Image: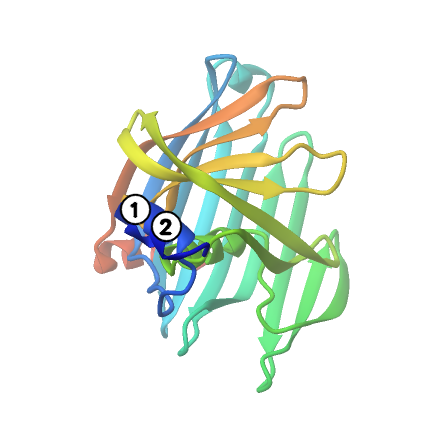
Amino acid sequence: MRGRGRCLRPLLAAALLCAAAAAPAALPPPFEARYELSLAGLPVGEMRLALEPAGGGRLLYRMASRPRGLLALFRKDTLTERSLLEALPGGGIRPLRYERVQTGSRRRHVRLAFSWRPDGSGLVRNEVAGRPWEMDVPAGTLDRLLVQLALRLDLAAGRAGTLAYPVADGGKLKRYRFEVLGSETVETPAGRFETVKVRRLRRKGKPPLDFWLAPALGYLAVAGTRPGGEGGTVRMRLVDFRRSPPDEAGMRLTRDGGR
């Protein structure tokens, strides 16, 4: 972005800093990833992330987290998010349905249904606590889970700097902003990775969230940090990653009831 000299750096730096490139990146193949969550060096939770075929050219992106260790003795909170999506012919993705289910001390169930017009704009129908509403959204709008995948695709396409995405979240159209900070080597239980450090910029008064994404895994997040509610920092580290054969992923989707 700042002259040809930067493009003579190693491949990772070139991918980060030369935004002039590239055709839209292809979606990653189906996969499953498992993460450990820790606070002050102690395990407090587990998170799983998966991308699966859903038939008809659609995909299901899902994330689930639950407490572990001593925390599991006191809290039974679980969080599951699912996003049904489709890939666009010219590149990019868009959501079709989104669901968020939170159990335990804070119970919540959110459903969003997206319908898209020929001009690319859309309508979101949302239901929270039994109260439905509708909202018009511009082309390119995502749900709060799918923004992770959109960020991965943009990084794989060589985009850098500050990246922003319109997101239907909490009954409002919000803008999620990310800043690419550079490259770092990260150690995880799943191995050692060369990564791109990305920071999610949040509104004033909320601390930023940092993530480390590995180009070798299609810019999958292999580590992350999040300020905890009691002043500590929750750390996320990749424990296991595997690409799933399409038939096996389809079987799991069927067992989950096609959701």
101 relative position to 25: left or right: right
Residue nearest the viewer, comparing 28 with 13: 13
Scheme by which the image is coloured: rainbow
Q: Is residue 255 visible?
A: no
144 relative position to 242: left or right: right
Q: Is residue 168 visible?
A: yes
Report the residue at 49% width, 51% height from top: 148
Q: Residues within 10 Å of mark 1 (few under 14, many from 20)?
A: few
Q: Residues within 10 Å of mark 2 (few under 14, many from 20)?
A: some
- Place of residue 187 in the rendered image (x, y in percent of width and height, measured from the top left): 32, 25
Residue nearest the viewer, comparing 230 with 90: 90
| Element under disc 1 | loop
The kind of residue tagged 2 is Arg
Report the residue at 75% width, 58% height from top: 172
Q: Which residue corresponds to mark 2?
A: 6
Q: Is residue 193 above or below residue 17?
A: above
- Place of residue 256 in the rendered image (x, y in percent of width and height, measured from the top left): 41, 52
196 relative position to 127: left or right: left
Q: Which residue corresponds to mark 1?
A: 9
